[in-house]
Amino acid sequence: MKITDLVILLRIPQSKVLHNLPYGIILSVPFIACGIMTLIWNVMGHYEIDATRIRLLTGYLSRKEQFVPLSDIYEISFKQNLLEAPFRIGTLMLKTRNGSLDIRGVYRVRQVVEDLRKKASYY
């Protein structure tokens, strides 16, 4: 006896809700959301790396400027998720004496980390 025969025999109602779902749209929503967040961050955020400090500008309607001296940084690392790796972007993570700082949407993040490690005095 097949499962379909058993379902018919037991008169279990068959649900076609799962068959009619738009799986392509459902599965693409997280990718679209991540892309929109990255686009907004890249439009609203800007960073500059100097020989002695990092300047971070954030905000669109109200700008915030933050300076981090390279001498205050004691750990430099980065992270990339599955969507960011093919585009060579990622999050630059800096740990300083005053706390931590994450700079998202950094293009060629590995190269930036290597350059910062060369400039910083702790390595």
Image: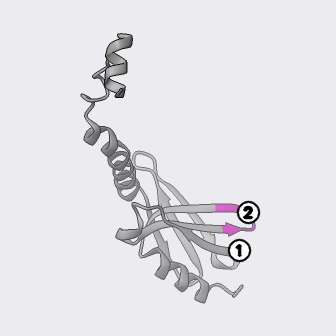
Residue 56 on the magenta span: no
Please give the name of the residue rendered at 25% of the width and 34% of the height, measured from the top-left corner. Answer: 22
Where residue 77 appears, as percent x and y from the top left, is 60, 72
The residue wearing badge 1 is 72
Mark 1 belongs to which amino acid? Asp
Picture quarter with the N terminus: top left
Q: Earlier in the sequence, mark 2 or mark 1?
A: 1
Q: Is residue 101 left or right of residue 103?
A: right
Where residue 48 appears, as percent x and y from the top left, is 47, 72
Front-lying residue, 56 or 13: 13
Q: Is residue 67 left or right of residue 105?
A: right
Which labelled disc corresponds to residue 119?
A: none
Vertically, is 86 above or below 120? Answer: above
Vertically, is 82 above or below 53? Answer: above
The residue wearing badge 2 is 98
Mark 2 belongs to which amino acid? Asn
Disc 1 secondary structure class: helix
Disc 2 secondary structure class: loop
Image quarter of residue 66: bottom right
Front-lying residue, 53 or 33: 33
Q: Is residue 115 left or right of residue 15?
A: right
